[in-house]
Amino acid sequence: MQLKPEEWQALRALEKCTLGKATTSAESIAKVSGQPLDRVNFGLNELNKRKLIGSGRTYEIYIPAVDLLALKFYADKDYIQALGKLIAKGKESDVYEVLSEKGELYALKLFRLGRTSFRDVTRKRHASSRQFNTWLDVNYQAARREFNALEKLSEFTKNVPIAVAANRHTVLLKELPGVRLTNRPELVDARKVLREIMDTVRDAYTKAGMINGDLSEYNILTDGATVWLIDWPQWVGKDHPNAKELMKRDVGAVEKFFERSYGLSADTDALVAYVTGGARFPAVRRV
């Protein structure tokens, strides 16, 4: 979608007003953009026709408009030349394959907390203007939090995605091979894969001081031999008041999945003791 300069200027100004919890009237948007009101009104009208924003007494920005702003950022940086297929669709994010100017494949993760237009979120949740702005903030903050988490984790383990850049509600990642563990792929050595998952959880905890907080077969990728733990925006520190419960839930979810899907079982408490610094990896038995 090609936007005119007036549209880009109006869209960026609307975004700033929204994030700044300021009024999103045409006059306020014009003031923020530094452009004449008639020029801004033209841009807003065009954006409204394209269904990128909603209009009334004030203006509301929709998810496709924010997607465009992020894609333009990556295109201007030569990270993205073409948007490819949808790799994954979840409750809180979409992941697309993208191609760079140099022919490199990346994965672009777009947070979708709410998964609807911003207008629909406020209507369905009966949200105030302040809550509406906070909803937009949450998507931006989730992307930044995941980017920072992956940067930190990559210092201690190779079993997490490599984050290349972040912008707005998106994180650009080096594309990984394999499928989600929930697909129950054939594993070269299921015991070894389970151990690698637990070693990664252990490295995150003992070296980075981090607990995923939502670990399950849905956010573990594997190519059958190696694993990568993905989705880290909800991570907590080891000093979190619920750290023990969250770690036990993470470890227990993985253990139960391997028991159901691969016939392998281990004592959850013993696994928790190991990933939090214990010396011995517990026995894994066939069931």
Image (cartoon, rainbow, N blue to C red):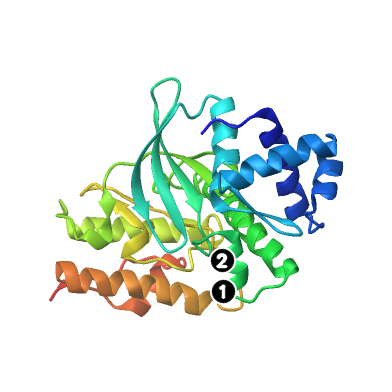
User: Dot 2 corresponds to which residue?
Assistant: 120
Location of residue 227 in the rendering, given as x and y in whole percent from the top left corner: 31, 51
User: Dot 1 corresponds to which residue?
Assistant: 124
Q: Could you tell me if residue 92 is visible in this image?
A: yes
Q: Is residue 195 above or below residue 128?
A: above
Location of residue 116 in the rendering, given as x and y in whole percent from the top left corner: 51, 61
Q: Is residue 184 above or below residue 244?
A: above
Location of residue 41 in the rendering, given as x and y in whole percent from the top left corner: 76, 41
Q: Amino acid at mark 1?
A: Lys
Q: Who's the residue at 35% across and 66% down the image?
A: 216
Q: Who's the residue at 58% across and 50% down the image?
A: 169
Foreground residue, 187 or 268?
187
Q: Who's the residue at 82% across and 57% down the image?
A: 22
Crowding near the residue tagged with mark 2, few <14, some 14–19, many ≥20 C-alpha atoms within 10 Å: some
Q: Quadrant of residue 39?
A: top right
Q: Who's the residue at 43% across and 61% down the image?
A: 202
